[in-house]
Amino acid sequence: MSTAKDFQLATAKRIIEIFKSGQKRVLLSDEVGLGKTIMAKTVVEMAKTLPGVEKDGIYRVVYVCSNQNIIQQNTRNLGIPQEDIMQMRESRLSMQHLILQERKIQQEARHGTDLPQQLIPLTPSTSFSITGGAGNGAERALIFAIMKEMEEFQGKDTRLSSLLKTMYMGQKSWDDYINDYSGRVKNCGSTYIKEIINILRANKTFRENKNALVDYVAGNANEMPFWLINKLRIAFAQISLNQLEPDLVIMDEFQRFSGLLNTSSDSEESMIAHEFFTNEHPYILLLSATPYKPFTTLEELNEANCDEQYEDFLKLMRFLFKEDKAGADSFHTVWEDYSNKLSHISSEAFDALIISKQKAEEKMYSVICRTERYSEGLIKTMPLDKMAITGDDILAYCQMQKLLQKAKAVLDKRKNKDGNIGINPSYNIPIEYVKSSPYLLSFMQKYQEGKTVEAAFKGNDVPIVKNSRIQRLLLKGGQIYNYKLIEPANAKLSAIEEMLFKNHAERLLWVPASHPYYTIPQNHVFAQNKDFSKVLVFSAWEMVPRMLAVMLSYESERRNVVGAYKDDGITYITKRKVGMNRMQEEGGNLLEYPSVYLADLYDYREYFGQNIDSIINDLQNKIQADINKFGLPILNITSADILLLLIKRLEGEDLEMRGIPQRAARTLAFMAIASPAVCMLRILKNSEEPENADAYYETTNAKDVAESIVALFNRRENSAAVELSTPKGLKYYEQVLHYCVMGNLQSVLDEYCHMIDEGKHAEYIVDKLNATFISATSYQIETTDSYCKEEGKSMPMRRSFAFDYAKVVQDKNIKHNGTLQQAFNSPFRPFVLATTSIGQEGLDFHWYTRKIVHWNLPSNPVDMEQREGRINRYKCLAIRRNIARFFGGKYSWEEMFTEADKQWRILSPSEYSEMVPYWCLPKEIIEEHVNELEYIERLVPLYPMSNDEIRYKHLIDVLSLYRLTMGQPRQEELLQLLKGKVTKEQMKELLFDLSPYSRNTK
């Protein structure tokens, strides 16, 4: 999303208006998924004109968020050129004095007319939290480069260097760091070095620890005082803070590090944060859909023994009004009055309540902006089939409980004998574990119950596992090895397998195009799965993501490999190469060749909406006519190498050929439509390319991306999927081309590139495409052959169809430059992402996902809203599918959205902002076409007759009402009170309107 929509622009203007009024702290709290980063980008641009911004000639924006993944996702969207964004490895506060000086020198050399700018990304864990760590190598090398110039340490820098190197870094790496930073410090000039040294000598932290450091470097202390590294980092951080002087501080999803706002604490982290926030009083913009816990249940209230959300709300308001004591006192008085009237609501006093509410609303609007969607009409709760309690569910519970009791007997006996068993055992299995995962002992090693069983039976046969032929606690190694069906043994897993694989979706290697350019046979797997979506799964238990990643990937692979290669004797763990690297054997170079001739031959607009067979026949005739001009005989062979020569001959190269392979014209017709390299070449020819880019730039980058796509077809499971989805009697590269054509690959890639960058910047698109593909990785899983056995070997089980988010982000086995988030936000595999941890991290997973599974219900309705906000976002899959359904006669995504904006917003121009059609559909369209739309599907696997059904109904009820009680104590009790005394229309009146767009259009 490149430019702000009307409601986002209204919010940005309001924030600037608040800043200009003298209020330095503002909260942007739009509902999750409405593009707070784009609004922040607009604020960044507008804030350049605010009073005091040009005080030192550089416009500095500090962007603080919880982790580097979000920084990588969002910094580009803030609108500051890449060369003005600081590298993350140099974003430590202790290093800013050097970065600022280098930036100053660069700006003096640039002599530009625009205000110089700099974006400084920081994370609390690396930038503010200094206590107890040695920092990174770059940070310590910079400290050394400065301190070695000090008189006290000249001639003694060997010991200083060895201290700062630490035992964890190799000498060569350390030497490289020192050379780099010593050179950079020298390039900044002697004046800069003297200035930093003088400031350091005056620094209180440095003065207090200087003697210990001098003693060590002088050789008077033998033991390395590593604790001094931390003190030096703090001293240099304090120096940098005094020089940083940010003009605008953006704190994204700040509730995840709200401890920074507690500047009354005496911790070093808080002292640094206090200096940061009060240094020259920067403008501060907080971003968060849930800046404090918006709702606390009675259960949570009783557990915490305090009203957490109410305290957080008051703490937030104190922070926002920090510089305006009168404003803070006034807000407190107004809010108390409103809260009192709300908690004593009656029909007679309703008018007085509304007046009080309006006063409170105005006070909040002076520091907070919040816009919400018109409705949640696009979210639909869908049932999951097969959610009946099965014998396997009951058997798993009984077997695990019985096994724990046997473990108790063993450990009690050991305890009586030895007095110690080495663990804190757990002898009862929570029923929630059994409801959440099958084969518990294969997936719950980190759980106390699993550790209890291991402690009791390590090195011995495990009862039940050995004696029972129908045990449901461990996967069987022999079954996995021989690609046998593994029974789900759990109603939830059975239901999700049924949903995923009912139309042979295991044969898909990418999500079908939302806007196909032609029609294909209805019995093809891509036609049968035209509404297929990736699936995001949330669970409360750590074992579930791991279990789903392994079990779903195994079942997908088993269906494909057994279906295609059952006569080849393939096993799950094998050195045999059947089905592997087939594109390397023949055809890889052909599909990786970006032919200009073929790219120009096929224009999807010319054939738009036609049947694929008629398109192929027409292109085949055109190609055949060109081939006939050569006057060469037809050879009785098919050869990818000769086809490549033929293409180059068609492009004008003077090459010797002895003849034309069979099916040449037809194969080239397939290539013209959907060869990966040809598709990418067409995309790049229609993109905004860098200056001085030429045809070589286009073909080279098209080939690079195509190599990654072609590599997909070298994997055994993927080649099996191709075998099962394409005609027999063809060479494998011909089958791959057939698969790409039936899979509408050009449309798939065009849609993906539109989501990557609406501005069509070729360089950025290529970078993102090259970071899209991830390799299958494995978990070591305990089976009946290995569990508790001394010599037993666990089974490596692959993840490909499904992945678990929490574990894979730092997985060193992913041999590419991409991330799991980028891969899941692509049309390619993985198709399922299971997690416990995304909820409020600010990460987007909406590009190809319109199904979300709440494997376990969250305790709080707001958590459910946050989970669903990961996929209910700008141009999400459900929105694109519906746009294509209504405006599919247009050729491109730009044209479709433009037409939707033109037609739909006039239905109610006073009500609909540009949220329609990019986030929402008009309610008139939803009502009229309710059975034709594709929805964001909320899938909640509930066991019949369980208390989950009651909890879910309560969650949904509260979800629609909790906003009435924001900032109020004892919210759940207040909701019960309001339900009996307030009508539906009165509830609408009680909702706060903090939306600048809404208030401007009233």
Image: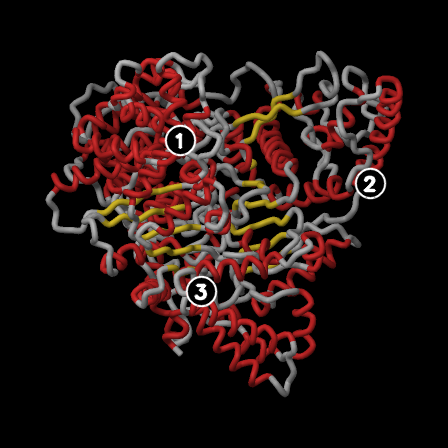
First in sequence: mark 1 vs mark 2: 1
Alpha carbon of mark 1 to alpha carbon of mark 3: how far?
Answer: 47 Å
Q: Is 328 left or right of 574, judged from the image as shown?
A: left
- Image spot of residue 464 (x, y percent): 84, 26
Which residue is denoted by mark 2 in the rendering?
Answer: 394
Residue with the mark numbered 3: 370
Residue most toward the bottom? 348
User: How would you rate the neighbour count of disc 1 (Cα within 10 Å): few for under 14, some for 14-19, many for 20 or more?
Assistant: few
Q: CA distance from mark 1 to mark 2?
A: 66 Å
The amino acid on which the numbered mark 2 sits, given as a three-letter code, is Ile
In terms of sequence position, does the residue under pointer 1 or pointer 3 come before the other? 1
Give coordinates of residue 415: x percent, y percent.
Answer: 85, 22
Give percent across and percent down for residue 700: 25, 30
Q: Is residue 633 above or below residue 259?
A: above
Dot label at residue 208: 1
Q: How far apart are the alpha carbons under marks 2 and 3?
A: 48 Å
Q: Are circles 1 and 3 on residues that touch, CB within 8 Å?
A: no
**Is label 1 in a helix, a strand or a loop?**
helix
Closer-to-camera residue (168/113): 168
For residue 229, which quarter of the picture? top left
Residue at horizontal 51%, vertical 74%? 334
Towards the viewer: 547 or 879: 547
Which corner quadrant of the image does residue 96 belong to? top left
Q: Secondary structure at mark 2?
A: helix
Badge 3 crowding class, 10 Å Cα cut-off, few under 14, some 14 to 19, many 20 or more, is some
